[in-house]
Image (cartoon, grey):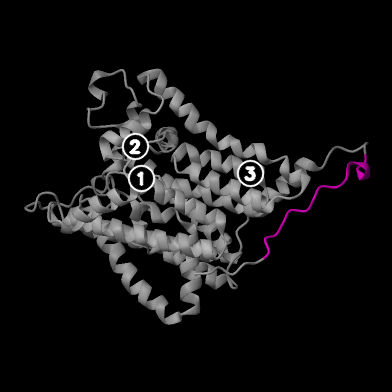
Amino acid sequence: MTLIDRDVPSTAPPAPTALRDPGRPSTRPRRLRLRLRLRLRLDAGDRDVLTLYLFTRVALLLTAYCTAWLFPRDPEAHHPETFGAVVGQWDWNHYLHIARDGYFPDDPAARPEPWDNREAFFPGFPLLLRALHPLVGDWTAAGLLISFVAGAVAVVALGRIARLHLPQVADARRAVLLLLVSPCALFLAVGYTEALFLAFALPAWLAALRHDWRLAALLATCATTVRVSGLFLVAALVVHFALTAHRRGELRRLPWLALPALPPLLYSWYLYGHTGDRMAWKHAQERGWYREFHTPWEAWGTTWEAAFGHGYTAPYALMWQAELVAMGVGLVTVVLLARARRWPEAVYIALNLWALGTSYWYMSIPRATLLWWPLWIGLACWTLRRPRLSAGWLCLSVPLSVVLAVAFFSGRWAG
């Protein structure tokens, strides 16, 4: 899965001050606007990626429609499930309650139940949901719109990153295709945080590859408002900075990379004001999802027992089997990235695995694979060198993605 390195285009340095005409206004804002327009402009490769993205959204919409008719909650029902009930499952309810009622509502009727543990969820997605709801008028539609737009930004950014490593534009599209038909791809379409996180994280990484550290830091700051795993992205940015920033002008940009720590600190300060606990978000995860620290071998053993010990119903056991597979995929990816000396990406995925692999058991690792962009670029390179394996991978991945989508839309646990 060794990636093919190519030169990353750099931004031309500004003109020396001595060459500017003091009698004319500075052209710096004009240059900044021009650079922004150039980066936002979609080329043919971007449009191809977006076309692929739209087709897969239609496919998921069709899957949700069929699931609503085939698997109603009442087997004797003569009408399908409502669309909002089909797509609004599991964690979506936490984001909805936070956006609608807040973390600590004054209304007794809106106060969370003891099992709610909504403090575990960072405020970026709920804040955007609350801001968009008055314009859309429906909570579910607002959440789907956020994920739809954010997913489009994410796949364009992934395609552009892949083009820096793969020789042809069509090869870069392959990385996007592999992401969009991956088993957990449905979480990019529903009201979850994966699409929004990638919409900030992937452009941040692209900016870092171009040595635009201020933009990378600002985008990473947005990512840390959405998920605490944004801090793992910051660690990768710091490693990339240490390996690539050698000019004196670039070294002055290093303090910008401390900016993404601000949202988690502010959120911890907010929770402390209401609970007296600076780590209330972490303790909520421990209460609700058993994310207290355990050694990696303890977590593996507990997950293995849950998957194959016949102590849980078959659907839950299958999901824990998927957790074990995803952990194995992640470990192999880290090893291959380290062998290729791609240290920033290896650090990013390794930190993800450490956080998810040191709990009581594994949970949500398959869904976390959506955030591992080096995995999808590496798989694109691997299948490019072995064309027969490309068809084999798709024949395995597409049915799994449909099965997982049906499980989620029908209200079953899907990771």
Image-based side of 265 in relation to 14, left or right: left
User: Mark 3 belongs to which amino acid?
Assistant: Leu
Label drawn at residue 215? 3
Q: Residue 266: horizontal and vertical position, in percent?
A: 49, 27
**Residue nearest the observer in this picture, 246 or 76:** 246
Q: Which residue is mark 2?
A: 95
- Let me know if residue 16 is in the magenta part: yes
Query: Disc 1 on helix, strand or loop?
Result: loop
Q: Amino acid at mark 1?
A: Gly
Closer to viewer: mark 3 or mark 1? 3
Disc 2 from disc 1: Cα separation:
8 Å
| Front: mark 3 or 2 | 3
Q: Position of residue 410 (x, y in %)?
A: 20, 53
Q: Which residues are magenta?
A: 7-21
Residue 139: numbered disc: none
Evaluate if marks 2 and 1 touch, with contact meaning CB atoms under 8 Å apart: yes
